[in-house]
Image (tube, rainbow, N blue to C red):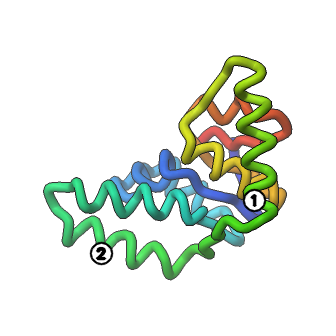
Amino acid sequence: MPASGEVLLDTSVVVPYFRGDAVIGRQVRACTTLYLPQTALGELYCGAYLSTNQTKTLAEITSFLAAVTILSPGLVTADHYGRIRAALAKAGTPIPENDIWIAAIAKEFQLPVAARDAHFDQVAGLQVLKW
């Protein structure tokens, strides 16, 4: 799905972007403002420290940070997190904890999430861009 405007990026699209995925590259360039949740940044750093080429991966992250705005969780995010997690638990459709935090940030700031993870579809009212 094409996007323009403001987009929240999930780790599942940032990693392929780092690997030169042309489709994601075009999508990223079409956006006016890119946001990265602090949770996703932590996932990227974890991947870097597990990488066989830490120096290269850390440099990619540092370079990428110049193009995005980091969104950190706060009290409103925590409320959204609680609502999302409770709804998923009631429905019997849990998703990874970090992705609940990412969805909560998206809901707080009313941003679509660019992702390749299908489990974001389980979050009611979340706009997911399938990159």
Position of residue 107 measured from the top left corner of the image (x, y, whole percent)? 80, 52
Q: Nearer the viewer, residue 53 or 80?
A: 80
- Callout 2 amino acid: Ala
- Alpha-carbon span between mark 1 and mark 2: 29 Å
Comparing 28 with 41, the one in front is 41
Earlier-in-chain disc, 1 versus 2: 2
Three-letter amino acid code of the residue under disc 1:
Thr
The image quadrant where one finds the C terminus is top right
Residue 92 position (above or below residue 55) = above
Q: Nearer the viewer, residue 6 or 39?
A: 39
Give the residue at x 50% y 49%: 13
The quadrant in which the N terminus is found is: top right
93 on left or right of 48: right
Farthest residue, direction bottom: 66
**Residue of label 1:** 77
Residue 69 picture location, percent across and down:
62, 75
Residue at the location (64% across, 44% down)?
Answer: 100
Q: Residues within 10 Å of mark 2 (few under 14, many from 20)?
A: few
Q: What residue would you read off at disc 2?
A: 59
| Residue 77 x/y as whole percent | 75, 59
Question: How many numbered marks does the figure carry?
Answer: 2
Question: In the rendered view, would you say 61 is above or below 96?
Answer: below
Query: With 73 as the anchor, is 39 left or right in this view?
Result: left
Q: Tell which residue pokes out farthest to the left in this image.
A: 52
Indicate the quadrant where residue 35 lies: bottom right
Secondary structure under tag 2 reads: helix
Tell me the SS state at disc 1.
Answer: helix
Q: State the residue at coordinates (40%, 52%).
A: 15
Q: Is residue 93 above or below residue 70?
A: above
